[in-house]
Amino acid sequence: MKKLYSWHDLLFRVGVGCSGYEDVRVEKLRGRLSAIFCETTFVILDFSVHCAVLTSLFGLTPTKFEEIVEEFNCLSFLYRKKLKVHNPMDITTTIETPSGVEYRNLDTDKQMTIINPPPLANACERQTRHCLGNADPGEFTLSASPCIVLHILSSYNLDPQDLAMLEVTCSFFRRPAQYSSPDFELSLSELAAYYMCQMRAVFRSMSEEQKQELKKTCGGSWKLVLRFLLAGEKGTRREKEQAIAGPGHSIVVTARGQVYSFGTGDVGQLGHGTTDDESKPRLIRSLQGIHIIQASVGDGQTMLVSDAGKVYAFGDSWFGDAEKFVTTPKQVQGSLNDIFVVQVTIGHNLVAVLSREGKVYTIFWGNENKLGHATEENDYEARPLLGALENLPVVQIAAGYCFLLALVCQPSGMSVYSVGCGNGGKLGHGTYNNENQPRLIKQFQTLNLEPIAIAAGYWHSVVLGKDGRVCTWGWANRGCLGHGNGVSSSQPFPKVVEALSNVKAVHVAAGIYTTFVVSENGDVYSFGSDKSSSLGDEQGNMRRMWMPELVTSIEQGNEKVIQISASNCSTSNAHTLALTQSGKLYAFGVGENGQLGVQLAANQTKRAKPERVIIDLA
């Protein structure tokens, strides 16, 4: 009896199953289906027979499936008993999974014992493959058409670790592929990483010299460059839908790069050319033709980043303009002209921008040497953040009231640096001292936790670990750290939120005295001050949540939240936005100026229960 397999298993066949990574890596490679472990079976991918089944399993359109199957010429694959799969190009013994896989090409291949695969069963031998009309039994030879393998590796969202493990498992993926562009010496996995980098506008716009410099900064591998780019996209939802809750107003960026705003507009922070409030989402039409990839908001300010690396600002003017405030988006000129910006973050005393090369620049707050600039307080020049981060690739930045966090991506792993005001221990170094240059937070090494995302409240900090754990530190006001009542008023170094030990988190957000955690199944947990009914507590009790609690009102709606944003402002005027996988936007908290984007009843100033905002995010 024929067994049908998805592309999940197809990828297993081309090399991943050769070296003991089956249980851990095969499922991750495709992510949609569990691995199917069965008796020895010879599988024929016959378009005419299996098209409907595989399109259903894998979610491909018939046209796309036909294109891929034609490219693969209806290849046949051997699936061996007990996962003893042998690659026809590199039949080796199973090796132990290393504790860490380096993202690099291997200069030499180790000698390994050759094991002859068991003979095919008679039933298997009778099966024929339909490859270019060839009726002879046999296995597909990888070297026969490496472009097909390269197409798989670069087209199906494999991550850098997947590509690195392919190099470890099979010499076919390590040896030079002899492709002229960009380099004859690159392996297939390196080429795949390079092509995936090229799919991103931020990378594609760079000159060859800039690309090579970025490669050097990231550690000398295109897989590491891809890891750097992916980490930045994950941390800021760059080039994806975003919802940002600001102090009194809200900004929404659609998948097409359009921007909607609503809420308080008293200083032009909505960007519509007026100072009127807006109670419903309104498109900023003056941005027509400009594709926005990221947004940040502050008290009366909005800043946007375009796919061309330009920064646009409106609202309360911080950039030395003659006007007291700007009511339509205006490109920030001067020192940012020569910087290709991919992220901006706004604190109370500073603005920071991140370049596509991973360099951090700060604006303002030069007094008291807080950021190592020793300039005037109203310094409108973007100045590079000196010290430890000068030669390290930063993938995400987050500004609090008077401090800055930076997430760094290195070959050895991810790490977090902090700089600025240390009151309350929010810098995470175990002290309450200020730091005028970035300093590594070493506590994560002690916790054996690799940070992959950061969030900064006004007075506290949050980190998401690769293993799904969540750490908080800083001022513990009103329960925003989630460590329980009666604990110290401050936490000067990162501490794991033990109440979430059974939750695998995938996203974190922080407000002035609030913290939100999104789990892998889309559930939302909140803790801190609910004075503005901004924690999602349906009862609207305006209490302090000292421990994480499930936001049941969203869970009951069968919605999977993928991003959440809490406003950094007065606890009596806070609101929250939640974006779901189905493309819906929900809002709760204070909305008297329209910042919820929904109609409130007469004399109503806030909503405790999340309400859907009508907006097209596509």
Image (cartoon, helix red, strand yellow):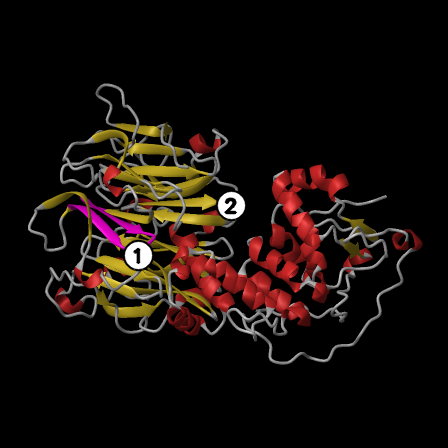
Disc 1 residue type (three-letter): Gly
**Left or right relative to 593: residue 14:** right
Report helix, strand or loop for mark 2: loop
Q: How would you classify the magenta stretch by its main secondary structure?
A: strand
**Residue topped by disc 2:** 520
**Left or right relative to 25: residue 125:** right
Q: Quadrant of residue 400?
A: bottom left
Residue at horizontal 49%, vertical 64%?
Answer: 448
Q: How crowded is the residue under tag 2: few (<14 C-alpha within 10 Å), some, or many (20+)?
A: some
Name the outermost residue toward the left: 322
Q: Is residue 465 above or below residue 433?
A: above
Report helix, strand or loop for mark 1: loop
Q: Which mark is residue 218?
A: none
Q: Quadrant of residue 496?
A: bottom left
Residue at horizontal 43%, vertical 30%?
Answer: 553
Residue at horizontal 34%, vertical 33%?
Answer: 587
**Residue topped by disc 1:** 309
